[in-house]
Amino acid sequence: MNTVAQVARQLQARIRGKDWSRAGKLPGQRELAGQLGVSRASLREAIAMLESLGMLRSEPGRGVFIVRHDEGRPARPDGRWRFHGRYALRDVYLVRNELEELAAAMAAGAVTQAGIARLRATIERMRAAADAGNLVAMSEADRAFHAHIFEIAGSPMLRDIAEGVADVVESSRQMAFADPVRVREPIDEHLRIVEAMATGNPKAARKAMRAHIRRAADRAGLALEVPGA
């Protein structure tokens, strides 16, 4: 687990605590970084992660506020999308779809029983995290699932391309976890991807991955139409 994820887990635990819950907001970043013993840069990244996950909301000049469950799902993702000044979220999902469909198809022709077991293990991690209401752990298991598929695909070039856009893609994945009503949906979608890959059928693997990316985009507030699909 990297430093940002560790800090995000600490913040998530404190958000559930009485003091912060009563205040409805986080302490100032200088104070909070000192309490946690981390750099302000790592703290900002962790806060951005929790904003993407729909747990926090930053208001310039006012601070960082805790998002209550009864506030409901944000109407639009724009305010939570970290890279809005650089990439349109829709474009990120479209590129993700192409890369991940290809990875799933290639992996279907190369996956072993050990590879299937690794993928299923990440799904069980997601299920356990969902049961515990741990969005950070769910996000981490989701990232591991997709990373394993790229590894199984066995293409160094495809893996390098994926690693080059990893931060942007990871933020787009986190956006899809903000709706508490639909937070378990990717568990079943991942299972269908694994089942399709296990048949060794690249077309079935592509179809299952495409359905997952479309539904993830929908959970992030986008109606995604893949050209030519």
Image (cartoon, helix red, strand yellow):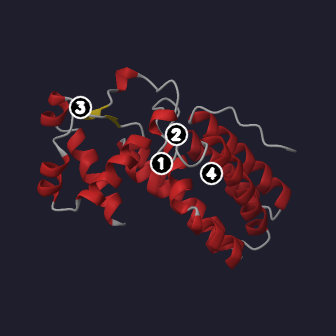
- The x and y percentages for residue 177 are 49, 40
Residue holding disc 4: 190
Q: Residues within 10 Å of mark 1 (few under 14, many from 20)?
A: many
- Whole-number angstrom distance, CA of label 3 to CA of label 1: 36 Å
- Residue lying at 27% horizontally and 54% vertically, measured from the top left: 43
- Residue lying at 77% horizontally and 37% vertically, measured from the top left: 225
User: Mark on residue 127?
Assistant: 1
Q: Residues within 10 Å of mark 2 (few under 14, many from 20)?
A: some
Residue holding disc 3: 62
- The x and y percentages for residue 97 are 71, 51
User: Would you say the residues marked 4 and 3 are in contact, meaning their CB atoms lie under 8 Å apart?
Assistant: no
Give whichever of discs 3 and 1 has the lower sequence position: 3
- Whole-number angstrom distance, CA of label 1 to CA of label 2: 8 Å
Which label lies toward us, 2 or 3?
3
* Element under disc 1: helix
Residue holding disc 2: 184
- The amino acid pointed to by label 4 is His
Give whichever of discs 2 and 3 has the lower sequence position: 3
Give whichever of discs 2 and 4 has the lower sequence position: 2
Which label lies toward us, 4 or 1?
4
Which label lies toward us, 4 or 3?
3
- The amino acid pointed to by label 1 is Arg
Of the 4 image quadrants, the one containing the C terminus is: top right
- Whole-number angstrom distance, CA of label 4 to CA of label 3: 39 Å
- Whole-number angstrom distance, CA of label 2 to CA of label 3: 33 Å
Against 96, residue 110 (above or below) is below
